[in-house]
Amino acid sequence: MRLVDLSRPLENAVPADPPGLGPRIEYSDHRQSLAGMLGMFPGLEANQLPGGEAWAVELLTVSTHNGTHVDAPWHFASTMNGGERAWTIDEVPLDWFYRPGVKLDFRDFPDGHVVSAAELAEWVGAAGHELKPLDIVLMNTRAGAAYGTPAYVDSGCGFGREATLWLLERGVRVMGTDGWSWDAPFSFTRRRFLESGDPSIIWEGHKASLDIGYCHIEKLANLEQLPASGFLVSCFPFKIKSASAGFTRAVAIL
């Protein structure tokens, strides 16, 4: 058995989100936390502790959409499946998140391209895999190689309404990308909207959940290490009450 880590770490000063939307991690080491431990135990002195040390601890200020995370239907809209209340991340079925995986390679597609259903069907066929209900489909785009650079947020192709519904109609309920967003980068969508005035192109892949509720994973890593199929994906989301997303330590099991 071989495990491939598909997750990005939470870290300071890495441009993995638009400016102002990244996480903030405050680190306290074993010395910095010493006063807190001594205050809890009156009469305790530092020289009575092994190495004169207390504990290491971190304080996080984050969005549920920092790092590798699973988006719940509630993130996309208040309803799903044609009018039902959308599920939050603590309500999505757990059996969606430990399933056979399929990796599709879209690295040759230009940044900002919106993948069509026909293109998706062609790439699934080229992978030699017949999609089954609840397969987890992972998209390897140009964004993966740009992670950690200022170009990341604007890198990679996206998956619009047509392609997303094509997957959902075949029973897929979890899909993922190494990009910042499942849809095409906002900079490209903004440009197309200014040219066309068509609001339906905004977040169109996410909004497919209005018809068929689903989840997707964003900011995946190391997808280039995976074969097209023949592996399992474990990507259980962190259980945050009534939240629109949850962090995941996504792993491929070969």
Image (cartoon, helix red, strand yellow):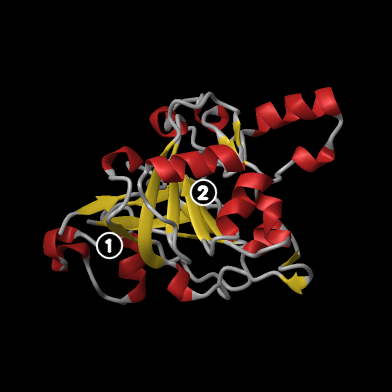
- Which residue in the structure is indicated by mark 1? 55
Give the residue drawn at x 17%, y 55%.
Answer: 2
Give the residue drawn at x 31%, y 56%.
Answer: 251
Please determine whether, in this image, residue 54 is positioned above or below residue 175. below
Disc 2 crowd, CA 10 A, few/some/many (<14, 14-19, 20+): many
Q: Quadrant of the C terminus?
A: bottom left
Q: Amino acid at mark 1?
A: Trp
Give the residue drawn at x 76%, y 64%.
Answer: 78
Question: Which residue is more in the foreground, 67 or 71?
Answer: 71
Image x and y of residue 140, in percent: 42, 39
Contact, CB < 8 Å: mark 1 with mark 2? no
Give the residue drawn at x 54%, y 37%.
Answer: 119
**53 left or right, relative to 24:** left
Image x and y of residue 246, in percent: 51, 62
Report the disc number at residue 199.
none
Question: Which residue is more in the foreground, 123 or 197?
Answer: 123
Confirm whether residue 28 shows in the render.
yes
Image x and y of residue 106, in percent: 45, 34
Q: Amino acid at mark 2?
A: Asn
- Which residue in the structure is indicated by mark 2? 66
**24 left or right, relative to 82:** left
Q: Disc 1 vs disc 2: which is toward the camera?
A: 2
Query: Does label 1 or label 2 sit earlier along the sequence?
Result: 1
* Residue 213 in which image quadrant: bottom right
User: What separation in Å lies between label 1 and label 2 (alpha carbons)?
Assistant: 26 Å
Please determine whether, in this image, residue 141 is positioned above or below residue 214. above
Confirm whether residue 11 shows in the render.
no
Secondary structure state at the residue bearing disc 2: loop
Question: Which residue is more in the foreground, 42 or 117?
Answer: 117
